[in-house]
Amino acid sequence: MLILVLNPGSSSLKFQLRRSGISEAVPGVLLDRVVEGKQGDALDPGFLGDVYDTIDAAIWDFTGRTRPDAIGHRVVHGGDRFSSPVRVTPDVMGAIEELEELAPLHNAASVACMRAATERWPDTPQVAVFDTAFHRTIPEYASRYALPEDLVTRHGIRRYGFHGISVEMASRDTAAFLGVPVDSLNAVVAHLGNGASVTAVKNGRSADTSMGMTPLEGLVMGTRSGDLDPSIVTLLQRHGLSLDEVDELLNHRAGLLGLAGSADMRAIQDAVQSGDPRAILASDMAAYRLAKYIAAYSMVVGGAGALVFTGGIGEHSSPFRSRVMSLLRPLGLFIDEDRNHSAAAGARLISTDGSAFPVLALPSDEERAIAEATAAVVLSQDPANQSPDEIEAWPRAKRP
Ligand SMILES: Nc1ncnc2c1ncn2[C@@H]1O[C@H](COP(=O)(O)OP(=O)(O)O)[C@@H](O)[C@H]1O
Ligand SMILES: CC(=O)OP(=O)(O)O
Ligand SMILES: [Mg+2]
């Protein structure tokens, strides 16, 4: 099956063409692209049109065909309605769109991708895979906010949690790396991208996570403030900012950008190197807040068996990992700087052998998880979509 995966993040649109049902020996990824862009680009029909032209050309190049067999979408907010992957219908698109208020940087872009895909490839089944689904196991004492019950019920107020697709995959990869069954894995998983969150994984399931009702709560992020005293929100409005201005400030102009003038960790790292005090403060704040959560969540999981860094920053930023690890020495965690700076691909150990538990850096593979879920949904509804003979018969297939 040829699957197109679309992953609109807050700072990029990632897309892949993958073959499912392929053995480990044959590369399953035919095309792997990231289009960096400001939020809202995916809402521009010209932008999506160009992206889809690229995909069309690649499909033809690799397979001599004119459409993918299935399309899998990452959807950040599934609200109360969606707890597992679903086939995209007009009703499902409408429901995802209604949740836009709760994921202002993400859900609208997903629906734009779905609508444009429906126009371009009307006969291709599409599946939505949700970031929130993995966090459905968080117990009520951790998911509730301390607000009166009638309000909570009326407005659907609770901690939903995000980055679940990445964290679930990271848990499976970590368990495989450590050689333990995933349902016995107790770990703290930090997904650090443009958006960032940390999750307590107990027996392979989410027990708590730092993002809340929306992807704004928790860690210091690229453009988002993370945790703050809610009185700041009311105070700013009392001092004359409108509701939309506060919303825009906290989602788009805060975090690393607000502190140090760039949302990009590579730029922050360079500025730290040249002694920029704002960048040093921003990086210290992000590391400090993450370390606080890691210490708390190692208690939540009943004693962590692993700490995992993933996402663009988690996988690639050795200075940031080093900064966080230096704050975690009281937990008995020590970084091995040779391992930390290793350029090896895939899951790798970055802690010393004498550390209390292993610390890993791991690539985030949301696309693999989305492709697997998409194939499972489509095949469960239409087994005829499985066509291994056809896969063998792609003579034009190139290796990327
Ligand atoms: N080699 C690197 N060193 C440090 N930071 C990196 C590196 N590569 C990517 N990043 C950082 O990763 C972040 C983007 O992560 P990513 O997971 O791709 O974001 P998203 O999916 O949220 O759009 C950016 O802050 C970027 O600077
Ligand atoms: C939920 C979220 O913030 O996702 P991303 O990091 O991809 O923007
Ligand atoms: Mg991401």
Image: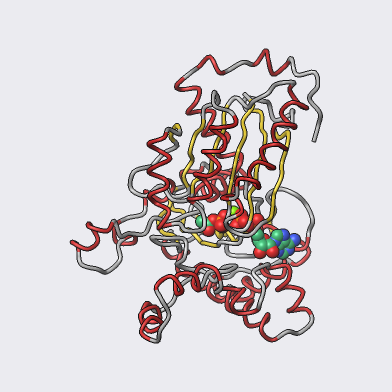
- Residue that lies at the very extreme toward the front in this rendered image: 46
Q: Is residue 307 above or below residue 3?
A: below
Q: Tell me residue 67's x, y (percent).
A: 64, 25
Quadrant of image for the N terminus = top right
Q: Is residue 269 above or below residue 379?
A: below
- Residue that lies at the very extreme toward the left in this rendered image: 150
Is residue 198 visible in the rendered structure shown here?
yes
Q: Is residue 93 above or below residue 317?
A: above
Which residue is located at x 68 percent, y 68 percent? 265
Q: Quadrant of residue 69?
A: top right
Q: Nearer the viewer, residue 44 or 78?
A: 44
Q: How many marks?
A: 0
Report the coloring of the rendering.
secondary structure
Quadrant of image for the C terminus = top right
Q: Tell me residue 354's x, y (percent).
A: 65, 64
Q: Quadrant of ligand 2?
A: bottom right
Which residue is located at x 37 percent, y 36 percent? 91
Q: Is residue 377 above or below residue 346?
A: above
Q: Tell me residue 57's x, y (percent).
A: 74, 31
Is residue 308 visible in the rendered structure shown here?
no
Q: Tell me residue 25's x, y (percent).
A: 74, 29
Q: Quadrant of residue 370?
A: top right
Which residue is located at x 71 percent, y 28 percent? 59
Q: Quadrant of residue 296?
A: bottom left
Q: Nearer the viewer, residue 281 or 216?
A: 216
